[in-house]
Image (tube, rainbow, N blue to C red):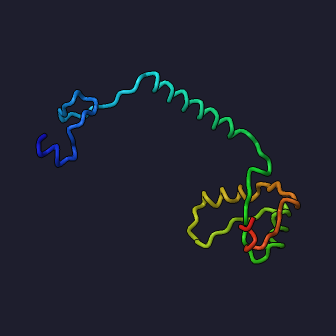
Amino acid sequence: MSDIHSAAGHDDHDHGHEGHDDGAVHAHISSAKFYIGIFATLVTLTVLTVGVSYIHLGPLNLAVAIVTENPAAMKETLLSGKPTPITYQTPTTSEVLLKEDKEIESFPLPLSRERVVIVKAQELFEK
């Protein structure tokens, strides 16, 4: 074996290339059946993913935790149904964004009094 092959970590073992190292890169070719199986699996998983995205889980769709100094007032605000304007600390907010925010603030929040629960912050992650 030459010094180049020894330095590169090659040895004299047969790696399925008739016992010689011609220096070429040998690709491992897989069958068409293998690639068709991969394709079919990807298509199936894509269809399942899209299908599951249409399942409506109702109130199970979203869980939100809000930490605030006045949780009772926050709860009443959320349940009131009144628009809650979005505000920014920066005066350079784009007019496009402000227009979108104006539309978003009028979206109803379908919350029920039973589903809005006040929990102390230190207890939130104990469950």
| Quarter of the image where the N terminus is located | top left
| Quarter of the image where the C terminus is located | bottom right
Direction right: furthest residue: 113
In x, y percent, where is residue 112? 87, 57
- On screen, residue 51 versus residue 21, left or right, reads right
In x, y percent, where is residue 64? 73, 61
Q: Is residue 101 above or below residue 34?
A: below
The foreground one among 103 and 43 is 43
Q: Residue at x 82, y 54 (%)?
A: 110
- On screen, residue 80 versus residue 57, left or right, reads right
Q: How many marks?
A: 0
The image quarter containing residue 122 is bottom right
The foreground one among 121 and 66 is 121
Direction left: furthest residue: 2
In x, y percent, where is residue 93? 58, 65
Q: Residue at x 83, y 62 (%)?
A: 116
The image quarter containing residue 68 is bottom right
- On screen, residue 21 versus residue 16, left or right, reads left
The image quarter containing residue 28 is top left
Q: Is residue 17 above or below residue 116?
A: above
The foreground one among 66 and 21 is 21
Q: Residue at x 64, y 34 (%)?
A: 48
Q: Is residue 123 above or below residue 107?
A: below
Direction front: furthest residue: 13
Q: Residue at x 51, y 26 (%)?
A: 37
The foreground one among 124 and 66 is 124
